[in-house]
Image (cartoon, rainbow, N blue to C red):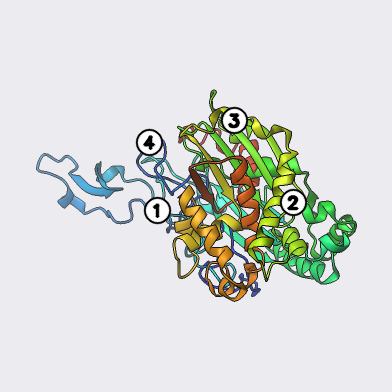
Amino acid sequence: MPKRLLRPSSVRAAPEGTTVEDRDTGAGAPEVGASSASPGPSGSGTAGWQQRRPTELGSADEPAGDATRNQKGKPKKRRKRRRGRKVFARDEARPQDNRSLMPGKAAVSAMEPKQAAPVISPVASTPRPEQGVRRPPVHELPVFAALDLGTNNCRLLVAVPSRHGQFRVIDAFSRIVRLGEGLTANGRLSQPAMDRAVEALKICGDKLRSRKIRKARLIATEACRSAANGVEFLERVEREAGVKLEIIDRQTEARLAVSGCGSLVERDTQGVVLFDIGGGSSEIALIDLTGRRSPRLANHIVSWTSLPVGVVSLAERFGGRTVTREIFTAMVDDVAGRLAAFDGRDRLSHLKANPNFHLLGTSGTVTTLAGVHLDLERYDRRRVDGLWMDRDSVDRMVERLVGWDFQQRVANPCIGADRADLVLAGCAILEAIRAVWPSERLRVADRGLREGILSELMADDGVWRNDGRGRA
């Protein structure tokens, strides 16, 4: 019997009985790959990042025998409602029942205590295949997996392809492990940090081995890149958890972040600065869309950089619990100095005044700011992912957080104890980025590297090439 996925609004564990603590990205979304926070190119709503039960076609319209035929013996048209418009179909032409689309009940991932469902804002309806086109049940579809071991988090997504350019999450795991804790001070991964990461990776390994995976990519980022004992740690992971991780370079990390957020860049956009504020590094990609647009957003990167500074490393150097305004300014200046050395920073200067230029942030920092901005009682990904914030709103939220003490940050449900000592370091990195690339709009993405990995794996495998649903 297929395993049930985790429920995002709880901190209950995965099916194996393990507690999942971190804010998850994408784990609760049956459909992934298109923004649902604003209308798509057609203006009729959006298709991705949704949480709904599988569409059941034909199950509500059972044949009514001769009573459904008119006096001339022809089948009588029956009226059905489909996504807000009337559709007529003859009884004999009912599409096949798709109740086997998802195994068991619809379910989603769990995350850390401070948040609820990590879906999107707002919820959109699950797209149906065309009538008469049978979508294969989940157990017949190829399964892909992506794992991201970062400086702060360990995250896994398992998914199957759905509509062109999209996928359906069937399992997920996310936990804060703080692998990079203490790394800034001594240049090595500490024993407690490695132990926490190995325990989380054992759960991921069990999940991966429980399924027939067609392709997977399992990556490690800045903590393992920079630690003197990073390779030694990965050997231990392979030995104890049965998971072989690949340390990716910073350019690959920047590209994957862009691939994961492609559907949040709308058709009329001409320029984007996408940034991913991580635990140990921050990736920034400048994207020029003034020419002919490629299906892969990453093909439009004209310049990129990876700063060797993230929320964990910056907070360890300047302090994260007690942050005065002077300390906060010093953190901003530190990041600004690093950005000043970025040679490609002016590659989008011709678009800065363009109304179709904006910032796009994917990280715990911007999702936390969005949650505070919305004054959420519990973090709700349905309302955060894809949210637009104007310049004044971001200014107010940063000022508000800088004015809070540590306990006030802990008390906020969108921050909590796990992020209270890191969020101001993230805000400092954000402020340095906004100073270099001022924009009237910032779009928030609660998605990242795993979604980029899955999108690239599926595209390279050709699963969407002849799916009969057209191009994205």
| Residue under pointer 2 | 219
Q: Hey, which quadrant is residue 407 in on the image?
A: bottom right
- Numbered tag placed on residue 55 in the rendering: 1
Amino acid at dot 1: Thr
Q: Farthest front residue?
A: 326
Q: Is residue 103 left or right of residue 210?
A: left
Label 1, secondary structure: give it: loop
Q: As drawn, is 385 to the left or to the right of 57? A: right
Residue bearing the label numbered 3: 349
Residue 289 pos. (x, y %):
55, 29
Could you tell me how far apart the alpha carbons at marks 1 and 4 are, in whole angstroms?
22 Å
Distance CA(mark 3)–CA(mark 4): 30 Å
Q: CA distance from mark 3 to mark 1?
A: 46 Å
Element class at badge 3? helix
Q: Which residue is mark 4?
A: 42
Mark nearer the N terminus (3 vs 2): 2
For disc 2, the neighbor class at 10 Å (few under 14, some 14 to 19, many from 20) is many
Q: Of callouts 3 and 4, which one flags the residue occurring earlier in the amino acid sequence? A: 4
Vertical side of 97 occupied by 294: above or below = above
Residue placed most toward the observer, 29 or 396 = 396
Q: Earlier in the sequence, mark 1 or mark 2?
A: 1
Residue nearest the viewer, comparing 154 with 135:
154
